[in-house]
Amino acid sequence: MRPPNTSDGWDQALARAGQITASLQPPALCTERHWDFVGIRGVLAVVLQSLAHQTDRSPRDVPLEALLWHCEQGGGHVRDLVVPLVGGQLAHSIDADPEAGVPAAGDPPVATWLWLTRLWPPPVPDDVDGLPPQHARRHDGMIRGIARGHPGAAVDLLTGWAADAVRACVTDA
């Protein structure tokens, strides 16, 4: 069995996840500036990489039906699935600070997982009228459409959307 975090495998997982995500999103929203795209692509990439590791395949050879099934099981299942990729403690953590000595935080799959498990707290009003600050500051400058205002982690909010993207690809195939 090949190691789960090979650079080539991760690049394949991320590229395929981007293509699948693009089947659900308009082309203008398929950029690094869009929280929805980055999150759905991230969920798909970690699932693809985990399944590739489990089945000793490349991420591009993981069947869409298998990817769909795992995404349909929800965020908790994805957390269980990524244990070999990121470790048991990190797989079930939430809002881990990458600066707090997370092992391999610079490894692309781990960095993606840290982003996927990050919390997005509601904005604190920044003026006397109680109006919320601009959304750009709230989401690291990213535009967010799905679950706007929900503080939860992307892995928990977007796994169903990831399943929808895969379903769209299966339907088109």
Image (cartoon, helix red, strand yellow):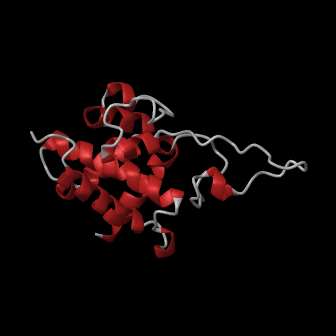
Quadrant of image for the N terminus: top left
Spot the residue most to the right: 129
Decide: is 41 above or below 104. below
Q: Residue at x 72, y 57 (%)?
A: 134
Task: Give the left or right position of residue 136, taking residue 54 as reference.
Answer: right
Spot the residue most to the left: 1
Residue 74 in sight here: no
Task: Give the left or right position of residue 81, taking residue 168 as reference.
Answer: left
Decide: is 92 above or below 31. above
Q: Residue at x 45, y 35 (%)?
A: 99
Spot the residue most to the top: 89
Between 43 and 121, the one nearer to me in the picture: 121
Q: Residue at x 18, y 39 (%)?
A: 54
Residue 106: % across, % down: 34, 43
Q: Residue at x 49, y 32 (%)?
A: 94
Residue 89: % across, % down: 37, 25
Decide: is 172 above or below 126. below
Residue 66: % across, % down: 26, 49
Quadrant of image for the C terminus: bottom left
Residue 88: % across, % down: 33, 26
**Tag count in the figure?**
0
Residue 29 in sight here: yes
